[in-house]
Image: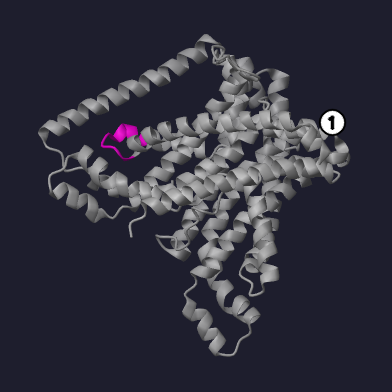
C-alpha cells in the first residue's frame, strides 16, 4: 500500500527509465537462473539416478511417514505443552504476589535467552534421553521446544491479557468477582481471540525448530533426510525436497494464521510482539508475508 | 565449577568463534537485507516479486536445512568455499566456517528485509504524500523523510532478528564449526558428571550476551525516539 505512495505517478521519461530497469532486472535474474541451471547441468545434478531415490515409493514413504509425520507430531506435542507452560507462566508474571511474579519472570527470561540447541542436548544427555532410544530423543526435542516456545508464549499471553481494555477488568471487579474469576471468565476469553494468530505463527517457529532434532538424531524430517542422502549421495535433491515440504506446511500454517487474524482480530494486531525475542525475530512482527 | 574454570581457555575460544560468526553474519545480513528491502518496496515490479519470493522461501525453511544446503549440497555443484582459509592465532576460518556463515547470512537477511519493510509500512501515508507534494524525488522521499522514521519503527524487530541470529549461530556447531555449542557438547562428553554446571555456564554466557544486545538496542531506541 505504502509502496505506491513512495513515488509519483511516473511521467514519460520515468516510464522509459523504469522499463529499462525492468529489462535489466529481468536480464539479471535470467542470468542468475541460467547460471544455476548451467552449474546443475555441468555437475550432472539432473541425472535420473540422483532423483530416483526421492521418486521411489518406499523412500517417499520413509520421508513422509518417519520424517514429516514425526516432525509434525513433535511440533504438535511441543506446541500443546508450550501453550500450557505459557499460560501458567504468563499469568504468573501478572500475579499480585512478588514471590510468584519474580520466579516466573526469571524462568521466562532464562529460557528465552538460551539457544534451543543447548537446551535440547543438555536435556538429552542429562535426563535419560540417551538411554531411551528414539523415545528419549523425541521427548528431548519436545521438552526443549516446550520450554523455549512456552517462554515466548508466556510473553504473548501477558501482552494479550494486557491488551484487553482495562474497563473490562474494572467492570468485573465492580460486579464483585474475585481475581481468578476476572481472569478466567472475563479476560482470558477476550485475550485468546487476540492471541490466536500469534500462537499459530509460533507453531511455524516450533515446526522449523524441530529440525534441530538432527543434533541428537531424533527421528524427524532432518534426520531422515540425512540418512537418505548419505545412502544415495544426492544431497542437493534431498535438501530440495525436504525444504519444499517444510515450506508447504509452513505456508499452510501462515495461511491459517492470516485467516484467523482477519476473522477474529481485524487488520492490525493490537499486541506488539517484536520484543518477544523469538528464535526467528521478525516472524511475529505482524502482517502477512 | 572446576571443570568450567579448568577449560576457561577453550570456552573463551569457542565463544570467539560464536561472536565472529555473529558479527560477520550480522553485518552482511544487514547489508543484504537492506538491499532486499529496497528491491521489495522499489518501483521495479520484477525485483519486488523476486524479493518477495526469496523471503517467502527462505523464511519458511528451517535454518538447519539452509546451512545443510551450503555445507553438503553446495560442494556437489562446485560451491566449496575452498578459497576461504584465514588464520588468526588459534582461530582458523576455513571452508566449513564460510559455508555456515553464508547459510546464516542467507537466512537472516530475509528476516532483516521483513523487519525493514514493516518499518517502512509503519510510516504514515501522509508523510510520503507531503514529501512528494514539496517536490522530492523518490530518492529524496526515501532518504530524507521515510527512512529516518522507518528506522525508528524497524529497530525493535531488527534487534530481535540479531538476537535470534546470535542464538542461531549454535546451529553451525552441529555442522562442524567449533563454536560454543560444539564445545559444550565436547565438554559434556568428557566430563559427564559435571554436565549441569557446564550447561549452566554456557547458558549464562548466552543470557549475558543476549541481555547486552537488548540493552544496546534499548539505548538506541531511547536515543532515536522523538519526544
Residue B199, image x, y percentages:
76, 42
Question: Which residue occupies 27% across, 34% down?
Answer: B44
In front of the other: B135 or A23: B135
Residue A32, image x, y percentages:
40, 20
Instruction: State the residue lying farthest toward the top.
Output: A42
Chain letter of the residue beneath label 1 in the structure image: B
What residue is pinned by disc 1? B190
Residue A231 visible, this angle: yes
Residue B218, image x, y percentages:
47, 51
Question: Which residue occupies 85% across, 34% down?
Answer: B191
Depicted A162 relative to depicted A127: above or below? below
Residue B53's image quarter? top left
Q: How is the image coloured?
A: one colour
Question: Which residue occupies 61% across, 32% down?
Answer: B18
Residue B37, image x, y percentages:
37, 38
Q: Which residues are magenta?
A: B41-49
> Could you tell me which quadrant the C terminus of chain A lies in?
top left
Amino acid at each position: 500500500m505504502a509502496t505506491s505512495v513512495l513515488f509519483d505517478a511516473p511521467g514519460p521519461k520515468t516510464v522509459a527509465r523504469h522499463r529499462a530497469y525492468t529489462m535489466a532486472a529481468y536480464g539479471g535474474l535470467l542470468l542468475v537462473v541460467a547460471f544455476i541451471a548451467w552449474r546443475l547441468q555441468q555437475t550432472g545434478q539432473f541425472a535420473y539416478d540422483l532423483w530416483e531415490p526421492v521418486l521411489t515409493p518406499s523412500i517417499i514413504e520413509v520421508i513422509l511417514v518417519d520424517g514429516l509425520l514425526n516432525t509434525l507430531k513433535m511440533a504438535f506435542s511441543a506446541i500443546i505443552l508450550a501453550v500450557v507452560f505459557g499460560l501458567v507462566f504468563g499469568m504468573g508474571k501478572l500475579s499480585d504476589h512478588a514471590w510468584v511474579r519474580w520466579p516466573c519472570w526469571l524462568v521466562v527470561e532464562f529460557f528465552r535467552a538460551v539457544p534451543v540447541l543447548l537446551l535440547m542436548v543438555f536435556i538429552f544427555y542429562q535426563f535419560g534421553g540417551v538411554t531411551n532410544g528414539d523415545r528419549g530423543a523425541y521427548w528431548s526435542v519436545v521438552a526443549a521446544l516446550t520450554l523455549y516456545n512456552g517462554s515466548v508464549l508466556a510473553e504473548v499471553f501477558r501482552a494479550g491479557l494486557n491488551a484487553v481494555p482495562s474497563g473490562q477488568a474494572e467492570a468485573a471487579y465492580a460486579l464483585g468477582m474475585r481475581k481468578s474469576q476476572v481472569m478466567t471468565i472475563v479476560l482470558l476469553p477476550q485475550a485468546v481471540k487476540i492471541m490466536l494468530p500469534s500462537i499459530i505463527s509460533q507453531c511455524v517457529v516450533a515446526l522449523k525448530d524441530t529440525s534441530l532434532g538432527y543434533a541428537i538424531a531424533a527421528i524427524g524430517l532432518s534426520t531422515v533426510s540425512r540418512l537418505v542422502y548419505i545412502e544415495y549421495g544426492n544431497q542437493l535433491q534431498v535438501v530440495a525436497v525436504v525444504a519444499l515440504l517444510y515450506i508447504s506446511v509452513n505456508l499452510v500454517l501462515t495461511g491459517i494464521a492470516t485467516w484467523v487474524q482477519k476473522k477474529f482480530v481485524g487488520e492490525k494486531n493490537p499486541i506488539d510482539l517484536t520484543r518477544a525475542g523469538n528464535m526467528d525475530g521478525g516472524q511475529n512482527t505482524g502482517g502477512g508475508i | 565449577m572446576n571443570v568450567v574454570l579448568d577449560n576457561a581457555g577453550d570456552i573463551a575460544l569457542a565463544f570467539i568463534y560464536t561472536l565472529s560468526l555473529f558479527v560477520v553474519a550480522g553485518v552482511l545480513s544487514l547489508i543484504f537485507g537492506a538491499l532486499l528491502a529496497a528491491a521489495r518496496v522499489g518501483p521495479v515490479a520484477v525485483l519486488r516479486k523476486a524479493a518477495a519470493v526469496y523471503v517467502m522461501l527462505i523464511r519458511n525453511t528451517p535454518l538447519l536445512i539452509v546451512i545443510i544446503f551450503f555445507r553438503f549440497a553446495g560442494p556437489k555443484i562446485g560451491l566449496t568455499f575452498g578459497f576461504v582459509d584465514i588464520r588468526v592465532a588459534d582461530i582458523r576460518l576455513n571452508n566449513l566456517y564460510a559455508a555456515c556463515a553464508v547459510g546464516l547470512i542467507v537466512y537472516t537477511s530475509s528476516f532483516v528485509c521483513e523487519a525493514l519493510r514493516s518499518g517502512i509500512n509503519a510510516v504514515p501515508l501522509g508523510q510520503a504524500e507531503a514529501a512528494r507534494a514539496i517536490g522530492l524525488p523518490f530518492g529524496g522521499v526515501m532518504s530524507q523523510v521515510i527512512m529516518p522514521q522507518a528506522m525508528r519503527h524497524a529497530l525493535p524487530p531488527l534487534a530481535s532478528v540479531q538476537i535470534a541470529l546470535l542464538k542461531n549461530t549454535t546451529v553451525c556447531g552441529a555442522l562442524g564449526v567449533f563454536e560454543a555449542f560444539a564445545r559444550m557438547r565436547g565438554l559434556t562428553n568428557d566430563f559427564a558428571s559435571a554436565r549441569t554446571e557446564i550447561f549452566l555456564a554456557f547458558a549464562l554466557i548466552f543470557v549475558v550476551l543476549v541481555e547486552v544486545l537488548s540493552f544496546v538496542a534499548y539505548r538506541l531506541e531511547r536515543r532515536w525516539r522523538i519526544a
